[in-house]
Image (tube, rainbow, N blue to C red):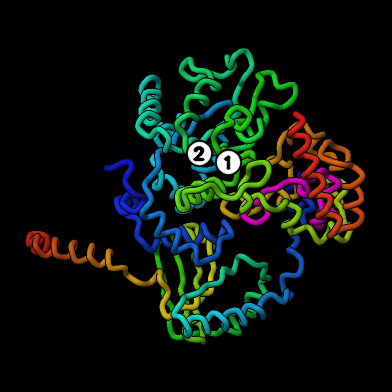
Amino acid sequence: MDLHGTVGEALKQQGISRRAFLKFCTALASMMALPPQAAAAMAQALAKARRPSVIWLPFQECTGCTESLTRSNSPTVENMIFNMISLDYHETLFAAAGDAAEAAREKAMKDNFGKYLLLVDGSVATGLDGAYSCIGGVSNVQMLEEAAKGAAAIVAIGTCAAFGGLPKASPNPTGAAPVAALVRDKPVINVSGCPPIPVVITGVLVHYLTFGSLPELDELGRPKAFYGETIHDRCYRRPFYDQGKFAKTFDDHGARNGWCLYELGCKGPVTYNACATLKWNGGTSFPIESGHGCLGCSEPDFWDKGGFYKALPTGNWGGGKTLAAAAAAGVAIGAAAAALARKRQADIAKEK
Amino acid sequence: MSGLRDIGVKVVEPPASDARSGNAEPLLHEIATLLDALLAGGRAGSIDLRSLPLTPADRDYLRERLGEGEVRAELHALGPSEVRETAYRGVWWVTHRNAAGELCAELIEVTPWPAILQAEREEIEDAVQRLRAQLGDGAAWKA
């Protein structure tokens, strides 16, 4: 089998019909908020696109991001991506081990220099010259540097790779850094979340395959199609926020009646992600639907921002007064506060 | 000993699922515009029903207004799909579900015949090759 033939050829070999593929493209276009006419164009472009070599490097990570993608409930949609790429290195999914695995990575990098997609999950340990995290005796810093040289684009998967995540949490003993802090001369797409929603990972890769370019990104390098709105903007409990109905404890009258979890520490108003619309576990629900506030896992330094169960104004997420005013005043100001908090977050990220 | 039933859980329905949002009516006008475009230039159009907020009541209203046509096709590819003709020729209601039965796309297609139902030339070429190969292989038929 020609590993780097076209996507169309690969799908045919796997027994995936044109109709199934068109259906997949229709579903993706819908999730990516592209006009429905884009599905046919996407199917055509994708069928002719060459399967790119993909190298997936795991650094300081928990494998949750890989789990999110590979154990998604509707394997026929999200996992289809594995038919469309040539995954030439992935420690967890690899049959090869040790020297053979590393040799495969080096060969793929050499054969596809300048053309392969580099996927990274986990943050990069920079302390003690990178000695905190090594693979086959090579530090993460060194491996990233080498792999980035020949990459067409880099996708930082998960909050650790995108923003440093948990390893970077204070006091950051390993000197953990996000990919974009170390790679300056290549485009880096941040697909944040702990873990990211599987279809978001797929969507970004398909966009790249279809259009040969990166999707439109926000100022934190995240695709706007998925990170354009806050959890709060699309939350089904939003009407309660607007009416000033808040749960005060996890077992009070408000909590049982599905009122807004803002005062119990929900970070929905400052968290940009698509959980409220795409949901989790095959579209079953998202955390707020299960009665727990949003942790803000797709935002930089969410771990160090003042406690998951403390209301936003008491943490380090933004101007306390502005957010408190938003809680009282509702819709219009709520959106403005989220925008303000977001700017503040971007400023914090820059300062650090 | 207390059981699960003793825990004070109340299932709360999302608000206003039985009320119409007002988003359904404009869709009917958009469909009419797409039909005009189809007649004028032969260009097929479609509307992604998940791209705008519709309550269950909106959806029911839309189904009722568009009615039932003569054709209803089932597709089994990566899970079930349904292609239904509405009472208006050229207007199709297409529902795609994944293998687990979850909705993954829902569209109104304005076209003489939805592209997903057609067999493409390349597929027909492939079919004739396979059929001829089977006809040539006499043993397979006798067995």
Q: Chain of mark 1?
A: A
Judged from the image, the secondary structure of the residue bearing numbered disc 1 is: strand
Left or right of A279 in this view: A73: left
Q: Residue furthest front?
A: A185
| Residue type, mark 1 in image | Ile
- Asked whether A260 falls inside the magenta stretch, the response is yes
Magenta residues span: A253-279
Give the residue at mark 2: A153
- Across and down, in percent, residue A258 comes to 79, 56
Q: Earlier in the sequence, mark 1 or mark 2?
A: 2
Q: CA distance from mark 1 to mark 2?
A: 8 Å
Residue drawn at point x = 35 percent, y = 72 percent:
B118
Q: Residue at x 49, y 63 (%)?
A: A38
* Relative depth, front residue between B121 and A289: B121
Secondary structure of residue under mark 2: strand
Residue under circle 1? Answer: A189
Q: Is residue A237 visible?
A: yes
Residue A120 got which mark? none
A123 is higher (above) or lower (below) than A81: above
The kind of residue tagged 2 is Ala
- Residue A327 vs B94, above or below: the answer is above
